[in-house]
Image: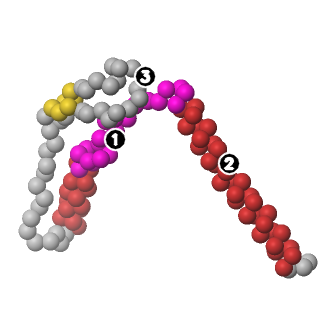
């Protein structure tokens, strides 16, 4: 099965990246779920569980997650550096807030409970 990937309006460095490409998608085989009475033996229950797991695993390639993974690309050095700086600033801010709460609580405890 072939389809055209539509690239959203992004600011890309190369015009080559913005071109639409053809992607070959492997046909997925859907295994029929066992029908009949509910499984009773351990082996029947384990096979039923195996079928449920495989059905969920096969559906991963057809949803929003698959589209995101197909559109994903390796970030350039500047993009990676910018993301790393943003994450580090976020960690520092959350750590600072936690430390401020610790100082506030320790001061309040000293005032409320005299030693």
- Quadrant holding the C terminus: bottom right
Find residue 86 and report its horizontal and vertical position in percent.
59, 41
Left or right position of 94 against 47: right
Q: State which region is magenta.
A: 59-79
Q: Residue at left 28%, top 24%?
A: 19
The answer, for residue 43, to whether it is visible in the render is no
Frontmost residue, 26 versus 108: 108
How many neighbours does mark 1 have within 10 angstroms: few (below 14), some (14-19), or many (20 or more)? few
- C-alpha span from label 1 to label 2: 29 Å
- Quadrant holding the N terminus: top left
Choose the circle earlier in sequence order: 3 or 2.
3
Residue holding disc 2:
92
- Image depth: mark 3 or mark 2 in front: 3
Find residue 77 and report its horizontal and vertical position in percent.
53, 26
Residue holding disc 3:
13
In the rendered image, which quarter is residue 43 located in?
bottom left
């Amino acid at each position: 099965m072939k389809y055209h990937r539509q690239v959203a309006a992004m600011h890309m460095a190369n015009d080559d990246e913005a071109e639409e490409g053809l992607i070959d998608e492997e046909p997925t085989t859907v295994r029929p779920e066992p029908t009949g009475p509910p499984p009773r033996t351990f082996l029947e229950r384990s096979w039923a569980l195996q079928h449920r797991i495989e059905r969920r695993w096969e559906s991963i390639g057809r949803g929003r997650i698959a589209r995101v993974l197909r559109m994903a690309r390796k970030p350039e050095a500047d993009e990676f550096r910018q993301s790393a700086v943003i994450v580090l600033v976020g960690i520092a801010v959350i750590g600072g807030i936690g430390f401020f709460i610790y100082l506030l609580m320790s001061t309040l405890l000293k005032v409320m409970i005299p030693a």
